[in-house]
Amino acid sequence: MKQKIHQQYLQLVQDKIDVFQDMISALTEDSKNDAKGSAGDKHETALSMMHIEQEKLTNKLKEALEQKSILDKIDASQIHNKAAMGSLVKTNNLTVYISVALPKITIENQNIFAVSPQSPLGTQLMGKGVGYAFEINSTQYIIQEIS
């Protein structure tokens, strides 16, 4: 199951990368076409807005590429007895994949939350084993299984 989760998160990040690359390409094309046909302040403002949007997308693309790089380094076949990078941790309240912060996914009717080791939940889990109990936001968690 952990390999399925890892694959789905890799695909999710790759899809984000593809979308950002397509959007950046489209903006680049638009700015080239716009440069040919317009003149004046309106033209300068439009180009400036396109440039700002392109910078935002470039930053988002960079972030997605960093996420993919981290996911690529995880060996999803490795089994852990303590929570670590690449661990799938089941608690009494939720199932967490320790990797990078990504949206919730559902696999085999089970919600999976991807968290980074630096997140509040990630820092509570890192290095802990089955049976460890902790509390976050008035919710009690007990580690039931780690793989």
Image (spheres, rainbow, N blue to C red):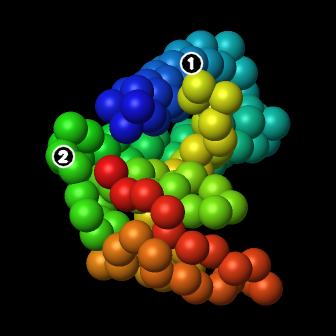
Residue 42 in sight: yes
Check disc 2: other Cα within 10 Å, few if <14, some if 14-19, many if 20+.
few
Image check: 17 left or right of 80?
Answer: right
Image check: 88 left or right of 60?
Answer: left
Which quadrant holds the N terminus? top left
Is the residue 44 above or below the residue 84 in the image?
above
Q: Disc 2 on helix, strand or loop?
A: loop
Residue annotated with mark 2 = 78
Residue at 43% across / 58% down in the picture? 145
Q: Earlier in the sequence, mark 1 or mark 2?
A: 1
Residue 72 in sight: no
Measuring from the top left, give residue 7's x and y in whole percent: 37, 28
> Closer to the camera, 33 or 126?
126
Image check: 53 left or right of 41?
Answer: left
> Closer to the camera, 88 or 15?
88
Residue at 50% across / 69% down in the picture? 143
Is the residue 18 above or below the residue 128 in the image?
above
The disc label shown at residue 26, or none: 1
Is the residue 76 above or below the residue 86 in the image?
above
Residue at 58% across / 85% down in the picture? 134
Q: CA distance from mark 1 to mark 2?
A: 41 Å
